[in-house]
Amino acid sequence: MILFNDAEALVAVSTGQDAFNHALRAADLYMAAASQAVTKADANRLRRKCGELIDRAEQLKKILVSTLSAEEKILRHASSLHGNVFPQWKAEPSDDEFEGPSNGENYVYVGFLAQVLTRYCASYDDTPFTLSPAQATTFAGWRRPMDVLAPDLDYLHEETRESLDTLFMNSHKIPDLVQDMTTDCSVVAGLSAAIKILTGKHSVLSSIIYPFDYSQGRPHLSLKGKYILRLNFNGCSRRVVIDDRLPASQDEGKFFVVDRSNPRLLWPALLEKAYLKVRGGYDFPGSNSGTDLWVLTGWIPEQVFLQKEDVDINQVWARIKAAHDSQDVVITIGTGFISAEEENASGLVGEHDYAVQSLDDSDGERRLLVKNPWCGGPTWTPASFSAGSHSSREAGQDHATNQEKEADFGLEDAPGCLWATLEDVAQNFESMYLNWNPKLFQHRQDHHFEWEISPGCYASSVVRNPQFAIVSPTGGLVWVLVSRHFVDGELEIVRRRTTNLAAASRQLGFMSIIVFDSNGKRVQIADGETYRGPYVDSPQTLARLEMTAGKWYTIVVDQHEFPLSKYTFTLSTFSHSLVKLQKASEAMAYCEEFEGAWKRRTAGGNVTCATYFTNPQYSVSIPKSTSLSILLSTDSSDTHVHVDLVWGHGKRVSSVKVKELVASTGEYRRGSAVADIAHIDPGVYTLVCSTFDAGHVAKFALRVSSMVPVTLEPIPAEAAGRLRAPLSPLTLSQGARRMQAPLSVQWLTRASVMVSTNSRYASTLLLRLSIVVGRGQDRFTEAVSGEGEFQAAAVGLRTSEFDMEPQRSNSVGMWLLVEGMGMGGEEHLVQAYIFSDSPVQVGPWETIDEIWH
């Protein structure tokens, strides 16, 4: 019974080919058990389990077949890091990889073990571990454990292998781990907080470091000095090989993590060395404990921002207390920026991670046992702290029947440890990092993907972001974790840092998970979401989703200020029932895209601006009725943008009237805007892209999606290919409300006229432009603005296009007529422009009343 239960459990915690293999193995075991069942009921039950596992194997096979090549390529590429290759984990190494002296000589392992450890172990890791300038000043070379951890013990040459194992791999007390000269507080805090899950009932350490002594529940000493670690990063479990050489210092300082309870304990320093090999060296640029423990243990990282207004610390406590009691969560906490004065007053270190060793609420007050992992560092003195409060002895009396908890409370005697209330922690720390046991979930799926960051003009939308459709047939809780793979380019960026570690992390950008109720279809802008996670500067971000059964959602991975152009990621789902995850599909069948720009002469501003008509405009030809979606995205999040779709017959429009407006994106939005049209009739429309402020220069992308093919073409600018001739300014007033200027040409010319005004009373001034031909009763209008209606002067007024014939303009006459209303007692300066194919001669302005009366 144990065998097939164990095999089935492995399916839930494995992915890819491993999960498929475990499913087949478990099905075989269930079938074998069914054939030997005592009762018919047991046999039927076991066969049903066998059938379920075969179905599961078929599902896993389909996933493997559909994703293997692309995802395997990503994982293979992600194996190379900092000049090393970290292959995917395939199987546990055999003991043969670790036994015997490296030079092939035969030694009797009694009496010579010390010499073997110090003299005959070859280097199995030629990685050039980098050091910081401060570390380099005291660096004394790479030394074997005997030289670094036990240089004063001469009697070891008479000891047995078991004695050496006990000396270097066993701790009789709970390890008290501290950092010294390496800036890896997050690593040491994480290891300190995770000691019980590493060595306790979960014995996570047994699946991390090899060789391992399973009978003793501790790592085995490798006589070759070679160790192989199974670390979780860049999309999968990976094989990390190190030797046992440790960086030695010329003084009493230590470059590696040390156990104050047993300074000769070796395995924590080996874990640290393997992790630092993955992250680039002992000049570790900094991280957070959630990320570090995800790599070291594979436990799911979650970051809780304690300073956010919507954080309910009562709810946080309820979640972590129960899980901590069952050893299913590891807790660390981190400070934000703290001034030097505050550091001296409080004893807290800014931008520093602390371990949480234990939790307690036995006396009605919620407390955390907080440890500063920095050896010799200051001890925090919270506001609620007072001498003798909640001492370990008092707590131990409350828990006298529970040896494990008594041991927890004994940790408060260690330097740098103290009990703090939940309220003090929430007030003084910026983040709480939680790492959850993945075995809390029955199912896990991993999907690896690549993201080439979109060009600048798409930056304000999510249309080209990675998007996934997800559904849970049974509903309930689903956790979604997005993990960014480590790359060399990021390490180069943070090593160039000139400020603190937090600033270095921020140089790598921020990412978030956004979830939409959009039927699993791709979305275009980050608006109307059902869930929005915080933007974190960590390589991992987690979303805890409560899903409705059978309902498809869209998961969008978003970023802000990523410095590199290309990244790879892994998206992992953790659930109690199997979920389906696939790439989100487009909501529309067809798409047309254009990239353009608002330039000095084409940034016309909103519809109230006189230059609105100069904005970029497009002809949209729709052959059949369809739904339509229009996206306008810019390269600047500070640019407020808008789209109008009007009945313009594909011609350039100068203004937008309500009766002509078919659809718009609504109010001007920062960065991007979308107009979704459920139904639009066939026709040729005009689409106008505008910014709120005239003269606001920016690049943009225009995307029109539809269910039938449509044609999208830019409309030439008003002055494109034409002469632009300014006329002499004219002044309108109560006494001169109608002004005209004669026009003439030497050959046939196509033309139009526009006017603008910068009058401070432009909001009340109404204008009309007309091109009139002839005199007296034969006078008629050739072209007019606003379909003959007076319009606000603040709106750019234009006439329709008209033809100018030399004979007619010279014989019967042609004039530009400007008429004004609502002038009050003010004078209004008006500027007119003629756009034409060839030069137009313009006479002086004249008042109409002086001519015709």
Image (cartoon, rainbow, N blue to C red):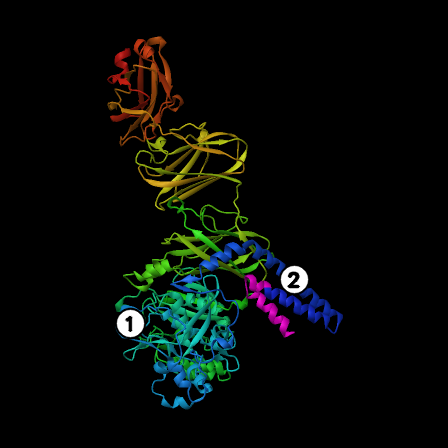
Quadrant hosting residue 717? top left
Classify residue 659 as left or right of residue 151. right
Toward the right, the furthest residue is 40
Proximity of marks 1 and 2: CB atoms separated by less than 8 Å: no
Classify residue 426 as left or right of residue 728. right
Is residue 254 something that shows in the picture? yes
Number of disc labels: 2
Quadrant hosting residue 421? bottom left
Q: Is residue 4 magenta?
A: yes
Q: Which mark is residue 135?
A: 1
Residue at 55% of width from left, 33% of height from top? 625
Question: Residue type at mark 1?
Answer: Gln
Taking depth in this image into account, of 275 and 541 the one nearest to the observer is 275
Residue extent of the magenta highlight:
1-20
How far is mark 1 from mark 2, CA to CA?
A: 56 Å
Question: Residue type at mark 2?
Answer: Ile
**Picture quarter with the C terminus:** top left
Relative to residue 92, is residue 633 depicted above or below? above
- Label 2 SS: helix
In the picture of the structure, the residue carrying the numbered disc 2 is: 54
Residue at 57% of width from left, 68% of height from top? 10
